Image (cartoon, grey):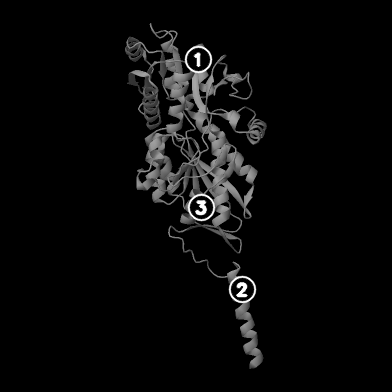
Amino acid sequence: MKKAFALLTIVMILTAALAACGGGGAYDCTDEFGCVEVPEGDPIRIAWAFVVSGPDETLGTDTKRGVEMAASEKGQIMGHDIEVIGEDELCNAEGGQTAATKLAADPKIVAVVGTNCSSAARAALPILCKANIPTISPSNTAPDLTAADRPADYNCYMRTAHNDLVQGKAAAEFAYNFLGVRKAATIHDGSLYADKLQQVFAEEFVKLGGEITAQEATEPTATEMGSMLTRIAATEPEMIYYPIFIAAGGHITSQARNTPGLEDIYLMGADGMFSPDFWEAAGDAAIGMYHSSPDFAAFGSAYRDFLARHEATYGEKVLAPFHAHAYDAANIIFAAIEKVAVDQNGTLYIGRKALRDAMFATKDFQGLTGSLTCSATGDCADPKIAVYETFNPDPANWNPGADPNSDPRKIWP
């Protein structure tokens, strides 16, 4: 009897020890938002929401490749492969809502890298955050997405891209201090990104002592810009700042050069049309065009190594400004999963709130784009902005900031 009791005691102790070490028994998920269960042998599913069709598709293709490379180079997380899926957010509110609805319906998705466009983010975030899916964008830059008074249903959101409070100020300083411009006009296309960025530029330009002669608006699908450009010409600006997207930006650039009074003024865009597709759309009218964009030269040697791997993988150079930001965003997700996931008999349990909190707690993360630390409202970037000038707009030779003779060429700072 004593031997039987002793044997039972040993069995109970071993069972308890196995359970404490992740062996045996059902896992009790105590996470407030629930857990994603990844069975043994199944991959960890990460999703993207980018614009991968239409005139702005290079923006999304560029960031999608950044996520793919991060996943491929990471290989596995705690013995599980990484599966990358995605949805087209179309760079508009309707697309963002549709993409988010599809992704939120998939209980296996652990986190989302996206969106590209701030207008899409505004529609997507209430859906993704309601589903408790942490979301980190490589290219949303609208200030209100991470403002102190942002809506409560943005609470799952952060970004590795710069805030346009930084980019708009940099563009204004370049225009006023470097070019010597004192009178400028702006154009936006109604998108959250463009409207906010041109407004930041205008306010900062006025603070420096400049005058904003006109603030015009167009549609993203508009092709005839003559009337608007004529109105702007009547105000006699020395520069037009139009931080919009590729299609409309190409039409404005080509038609401005044929508008009396605007033939020789400075033209400046931003990262939304910093792409070889813009060169194709604008043609030779893009010669002398300025763009504000991330300062690739400040990213360091790890970024240059990434560029070499990218070209070896895809057979071409990068297409737009935010590939490295997407790479960093994905790796922030991977690092957070490793911190919070629980392995029980090969099955991973990833607490949704724990994952979100771990991502927001990112501090001094050494990414391609710099040392990243996330604020309480999701600004994680180490923002570095430069201005580039186009000299020979041949899309086949797109090579931004790679060396002092590259095209487009970094000219400031």
| Vertical side of 3 occupied by 380: above or below | above
Specify few, some or many for label 2: CA neighbours under 10 Å numbering under 14, 14-19, or 20 or more: few
Residue beneath label 2, please?
17
Of circles 3 and 2, which is in front? 3
Residue 386 as seen in the image, left or right of residue 259: right
Mark 3 or mark 2: whose residue is earlier in sequence: 2
Mark 1 or mark 3: whose residue is earlier in sequence: 1
Give the label on residue 327, or none.
Answer: none
Q: Residue 145 falls in which quadrant of the image?
A: top left
Residue beneath label 1, please?
286
| Vertical side of 84 occupied by 279: above or below | above
Tell me which residue sits at (60%, 28%) in the image. 297
| Vertical side of 65 occupied by 365: above or below | below
Between marks 2 and 1, how big is the CA–CA gap?
Answer: 69 Å
Specify few, some or many for label 1: CA neighbours under 10 Å numbering under 14, 14-19, or 20 or more: many
The kind of residue tagged 2 is: Ala
The kind of residue tagged 1 is: Ala
Q: Nearer the viewer, residue 118 or 4?
A: 118
Residue 130 as seen in the image, left or right of residue 302: left
Q: Position of residue 27 (x, y in %)?
A: 52, 66
Q: In the structure shown, which secondary structural element does the residue marked by tag 2 occupy?
A: helix
Q: Position of residue 46 (x, y in %)?
A: 53, 46
